[in-house]
């Protein structure tokens, strides 16, 4: 079991006040907070060895290059990729998805089908719609039930030899549903389709094994797992990454350039044009170290307790309804109170020091499905406490009293 | 009453509250007391863009004065539009065009709203002024 009191000491921001009240930070699905250990790595980089990588002959450049590549290996180990060059540093999940969506432009033909789950956020919808527009491929939706679980029988019916790509999130940001990605991947592979899993919401809660999953692409954002913003990764199987053309042209991604022809660098550099977020990559590695030191099993166990307690306490509030009640879900609670607008509730919670997200969570199709303008979303991390759940519940009750 | 006098009155009312929870409560009360817009005016054309919640505003000329009615699906937003309507409704279009909006800063409304709501507030003021300009042109 994790020692939450001790862990909280690692997060200086958790001691601050908001609107004169102690901060209760429950917007972890949007971005998580950063521990001192990771902040120290960021400061150390800029204080001691800030230099451009891979090209410099001088000591600082060598040091930065070494640490950047060590971070890549840490990420490889954490996600159990077969090779470190299958880990592409990106600015985050959205960038990662766009690399793949762009790359498939040359691999799809008119009439090919691509399947998307009904519970995606916009980053995992729009790039594929753009791909469909460019190629004439058809985008089909895997529907979900009212509990927020994918209808796997319909998924099977949708799969055919025409299906070239399937994309789905590992965990839904708006509902907390943990999707059966093993089954999704296996069934897609049976018809010869490639699979991209958006792991942005899963990576902070569960350890995903790329080889065991046999997934073709997997995307992660560092800022949702105690790392910096503007940093993330795309995992791609070697054979797929070799098939995809480069996404951007520039320095670093070339082998040889003449005005007649350019040849491209090998993986991973083919997809890493220009100067990357060097400090971000190194800090991403440090964030993984931090979370692994606590242990993902311990994190999952503790967060599940937070989820159960918060669900039980929130449901005692009359008129409160939770959206996303999948059997297998993570520590995200999306709710509304009958007759009240989520935006009003969120605004009052903010005045009481409680940070939650309100709105459609960049997943408008989900809100359309439930015919609601949005929800209030409380998302928990391993540094949240049971007493913070109590503060949330009391704040929701107060907001309800004020608004009704 | 002239716009400036009404605005001063609103500033006075808000200065009575010690903290922002009380001001929020007051805004919620104002929202609840807002005369509702006729349902037939709750159209897409009347929605003010830039709000996370929906706001509908309708303007009508009664004699030489412009009368605003409004509604929102969120009660705090309704309170905000209620304050604006109180300040600007039932006034001559030219006076609305000429009126300044400093009172918003004086009651600290903008800085105590979330950025999206503050943007919505700016959009609402802009929309009321646009109506005034449109009707003034008509009167001319």
Image (cartoon, rainbow, N blue to C red):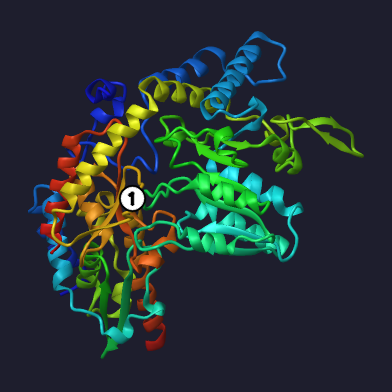
Residue at 20% x, 47% y: name it: A351
Query: Going by the image, does A347 lie left or right of A221?
Result: left
Residue toward you, A2 or B20: A2
Please name the residue that numbered disc 1 is placed on: A327
Question: Quadrant of the image for the N terminus of chain B?
Answer: bottom left
Residue at image point 37% right, 70% down: B48
- In the drawing, does residue A328 fall left or right of residue A71? left
Relative image position of residue A166 (x, y in whole percent): 59, 53
Q: Quick one: SS at disc 1? A: loop
Q: Quadrant of residue B139?
A: bottom left
Query: Circle 1: is it few (<14), some (14-19), or many (20+) Cα within 10 Å?
Result: few
Q: Where in the figure is residue A17, as x and y percent of width and height? A: 21, 34
**Residue situated in front as seen by the camera: A287 or A53:** A287
The residue closer to the viewer here, A257 or A74, is: A74
**Res. B118 image quadrant:** bottom left
Q: On the picture, is A4 further left or further right than A214? A: left
| Count of numbered circles in the view | 1
Quadrant that contains the C terminus of chain B: bottom left
Q: Quadrant of residue A383?
A: top left
The chain identifier of the residue carrying mark 1 reads A
Q: Is residue B84 above or below residue A377?
A: below
Residue at figure coordinates x 49%, y 61% from the top left: A153
Any part of residue A168 in sight: yes
């Amino acid at each position: 079991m994790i020692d939450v009191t001790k862990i909280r000491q690692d997060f200086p921001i958790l001691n601050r006040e908001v609107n004169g009240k102690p901060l209760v930070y429950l917007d972890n699905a949007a971005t998580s907070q950063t521990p001192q250990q990771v902040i120290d790595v960021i400061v150390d980089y800029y204080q001691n060895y800030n230099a451009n990588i891979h090209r410099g002959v001088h000591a600082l450049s060598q040091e930065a290059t070494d640490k950047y590549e060590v971070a890549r290996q840490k990420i490889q180990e954490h996600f159990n990729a077969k090779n470190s060059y299958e880990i592409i540093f990106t600015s985050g999940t959205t960038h990662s998805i766009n690399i793949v969506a762009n790359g498939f432009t040359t691999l799809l033909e008119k009439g090919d089908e691509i399947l998307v789950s009904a519970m995606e956020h916009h980053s995992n919808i729009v790039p594929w719609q753009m791909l469909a527009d460019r190629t004439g491929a058809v985008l089909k939706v895997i529907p979900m039930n009212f509990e927020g679980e994918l209808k796997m029988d319909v998924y099977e019916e949708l799969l055919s030899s025409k299906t070239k790509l399937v994309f789905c999130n590992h965990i839904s940001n708006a509902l907390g549903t943990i999707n059966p990605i093993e089954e999704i991947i296996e069934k897609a592979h049976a018809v010869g389709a490639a699979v991209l899993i958006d792991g942005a919401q899963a990576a902070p809660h569960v350890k995903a094994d790329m080889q065991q999953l046999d997934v073709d692409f997997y995307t992660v954002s560092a800022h949702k797992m105690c790392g910096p913003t503007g940093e993330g990764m795309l995992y791609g199987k070697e054979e797929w990454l070799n098939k995809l053309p480069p996404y951007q042209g520039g320095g670093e991604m070339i082998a040889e350039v003449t005005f007649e022809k350019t040849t491209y660098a090998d993986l991973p550099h083919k997809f890493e044009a220009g100067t990357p977020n060097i400090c971000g990559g190194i800090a991403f590695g440090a964030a993984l170290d931090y979370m692994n030191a606590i242990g993902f099993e311990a994190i999952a166990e503790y967060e599940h307790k937070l989820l159960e307690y918060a669900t039980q306490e929130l449901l005692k509030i009359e008129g409160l309804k939770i959206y996303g009640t999948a059997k297998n879900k993570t520590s995200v609670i999306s709710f509304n109170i009958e007759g009240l607008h989520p935006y009003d509730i969120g605004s009052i919670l903010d005045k009481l020091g409680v940070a939650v997200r309100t709105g459609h969570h960049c997943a408008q199709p989900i809100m359309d499905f439930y015919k609601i303008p949005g929800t209030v979303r409380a998302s928990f991390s391993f540094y949240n406490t049971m007493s913070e759940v109590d503060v949330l519940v009391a704040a929701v009750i107060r907001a309800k009293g004020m608004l009704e | 009453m002239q716009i400036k006098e009404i605005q001063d009155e609103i500033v006075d009312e808000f200065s009575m509250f010690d903290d922002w929870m009380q001001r929020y409560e007051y805004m919620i009360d104002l929202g609840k007391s807002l005369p509702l817009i006729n349902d037939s005016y709750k159209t897409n054309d009347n929605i003010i863009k830039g709000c996370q919640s929906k706001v509908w505003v309708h303007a009508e000329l009664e004699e030489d004065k412009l009368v605003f009615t409004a509604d929102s699906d969120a009660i705090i937003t309704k309170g905000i539009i209620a304050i604006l309507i109180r300040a600007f409704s039932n006034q001559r279009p030219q006076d609305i065009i000429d009126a300044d909006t400093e009172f918003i800063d004086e009651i600290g409304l903008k800085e105590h709203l979330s950025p999206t709501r503050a943007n919505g507030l700016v959009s609402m003021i802009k929309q009321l002024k646009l109506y005034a300009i449109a009707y003034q042109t008509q009167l001319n």
